[in-house]
Image: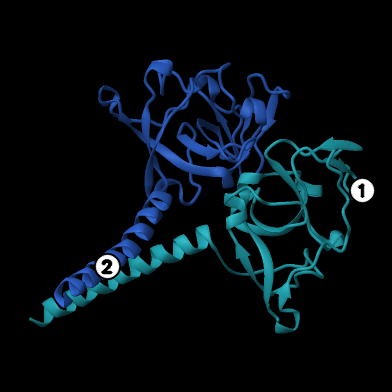
Chain colours: A cyan, B blue
Amino acid sequence: MMLRGALGKTFRLVGYTIQYGCIAHCAFEYVGGVVMCSGPSMEPTIQNSDIVFAENLSRHFYGIQRGDIVIAKSPSDPKSNICKRVTGLEGDKILSTGPSDFFKSHSYVPMGHVWLEGDNLQNSTDSRCYGPIPYGLIRGRIFFKIWPLSDFGFLRDSPNGHRFSDD
Amino acid sequence: MAQSQGWVRRYCKAFCKGFFVAVPVAVTFLDRVACVARVEGASMQPSLNPGGSQSSDVVLLNHWKARNFQVQRGDIVSLVSPKNPEQKIIKRVIALEGDIIRTMGHKNRYVKVPRGHIWVEGDHHGHSFDSNSFGPVSLGLLHAHATHILWPPERWQKLESFLPPERSPMQSEEE
């Protein structure tokens, strides 16, 4: 008698877990979620251990624009995420001003790809190092900071100005 | 009057309850476990779509198998196209990270697959938009493993993971 009660309770618990897990998946996949960022590459806009809000609607509707800060899967490690600013869309001309000679003086962002750069240009491993990344790796767009409270609010534009032309 | 209103209310309540359970569970299942897709094009002939445009194969895409980005050489996988993020392409994995392979029609004769990337090719060489055109693809674009052909019924089969011997890597990191 008690076993039946315990079994029923377990099944109910499993059922609720699956149900809420699925709702959580749908919420994060299609709406957005809270993310904690680590690393110095987006200073001063996002500091190490800041907590931000990411929305995933823009990427589903292909509405990511120049100047957006995005979370993307790392091109060399699919299990880790990177957080950078989109500074070039497909077709943009890339001017190499960085320390690496990866590209010649004029190159274009290929179709279906974006060019990412961290705001902290001196301390950021980004497209200047590994090249443009496919749009399909983008997971979401960060647009709002919720921690620390002193910096609560929408995120600023890039401190590096606009370095790309869309011609 | 009161009785029919109570019935409608209970029905709406049950409907909402069912809806908010069924829709997230179904969506999560299709995103994380498995879904089906129709294959278009001739790039994977003769394994897929041997009949050309007359009959398209419908395959079972297994997300669960691909959840940790573990793929083997010879697997047929679906991925987000690196040239067009709105499209999914279905190809065979030919080489994994660290392998050096001889390409067919790529601008470099030999390519070493970078870390976190794979080299994919369609079985129908020459009629396939694959890594020979766009280079190695990041594993982050992996969408699912194509494991079975479900339709048409006479083509019902399990898709075997088979690497054609002439496409073996010249040198792989495991050796």
> For the residue labelled by badge 1, is the local secondary structure a helix, a strand or a loop?
loop
As measured in the structure, the alpha-carbon distance from the residue carrying label 2 to the one carrying label 1 is 62 Å
Question: Which residue is rendered at x = 74% and y = 40% of the image?
Answer: A90
What amino acid does circle 2 point to?
A: Cys
Residue B20, numbered label? none
Closer to the camera: disc 2 or disc 1? 2
State which chain disc 1 sits on: A
Residue occupied by mark 1: A97
Residue A1 horizontal side relative to residue A48, left or right: left
Residue B34 at least partly seen: yes
Residue occupied by mark 2: B12
Which residue is farthest front? B1
Label 1 neighbourhood size at 10 Å, few (<14), some (14-19), many (20+)?
few
Question: Which residue is rendered at x = 35% and y = 54% of the image?
Answer: B26
Residues tagged by mark 2 and mark 1 found on one chain of the structure: no
Query: Closer to the camera, A81 or A112?
Result: A112
Q: Position of residue B28 (x, y in %)?
A: 40, 56
Query: Closer to the camera, A136 or A82?
Result: A136
Query: Closer to the camera, A33 or A107?
Result: A33
Which residue is farthest left? A1
Question: Which residue is rendered at x = 79% and y = 68% of the image?
Answer: A156
